[in-house]
Amino acid sequence: MARKYVLDTNLYTDAIRDPVKEQALEQFLERNAPMIYMSAVVMQELRAGAVTNAQARALQDGIFDTFERRNRIAGPSVAAFKDCGRILAALFRQDGVPYRERPRSLVNDILLAITCRENGFTLLTTDNDFRTIRPHLRGFTYAPPWPTEVGRRRTGGAGKVKPT
């Protein structure tokens, strides 16, 4: 069974800022579209960054519409919010930093991680916050971009790679 992936917000924002990263993202999406899903948490973060109507339209037309048409969006469940609270409490016990002093983005990252776990997604990210979250969330997987063998299998002939 092929892995299913969610891309973290940082991969989209990096692509907006850097043409080389934009090309890498586009190539990954083209090769692996059937295995890519969007997180509602990532949608919220991206939309919050689109401060003009033109930016919001570009985001909707360029990214969101594709996932919405294909019904490939996953959001946190009620259980995810409870689990998020458990993880925040565990982090406090671990390092003494109270919830009110944590960066707001950490809550989103925890909800994103739980959503990925609940749906069997691997999160692709460059965000180090997931190192902190991972020990508190059994079954959550994440990886750096861009897995090279996603959606591909080796064939017997001359080392060629064929899409599945």
Image: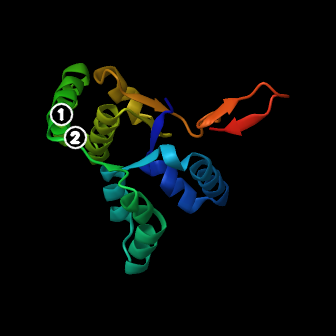
Q: Secondary structure at mark 2?
A: helix
Task: State the colouring used for the structure image.
Answer: rainbow
Relative horizontal placement of residue 149, taking residue 63 as reference (left or right): right
Residue 71 x, y percent position in the rendering: 35, 55
Front residue (pair 80, 86): 80
Circle 1/circle 2 CB separation < 8 Å: yes
Specify the amino acid type for callout 2: Glu
| Residue neighbourhood size for the residue with mark 1, other residues' Cα within 10 Å, grouped as few (<14), some (14–19), many (≥20) | few
Vertical relation: 36 (above or below) 13: above
Q: Position of residue 70 (x, y in %)?
A: 40, 57
Q: Which residue is at a point 48% across and 67% down the rendered structure image?
A: 62
Seen in the image, is 47 located left or right of residue 125? left
Residue 101, label in figure: 2
Kindly identify the residue that appears in the image at 33 percent across and 29 percent down: 133
Q: Is residue 155 above or below residue 55?
A: above
For mark 2, does the 10 Å Cα neighbourhood hold few (<14), some (14 to 19), or many (20 or more) residues?
A: few
Horizontal arrangement in the rendering, residue 24 relative to residue 125 (left or right): right
Name the mark on residue 98: 1
Position of residue 108 measured from the top left corner of the image (x, y, whole percent):
29, 45
Q: CA separation, marks 1 and 2?
A: 6 Å
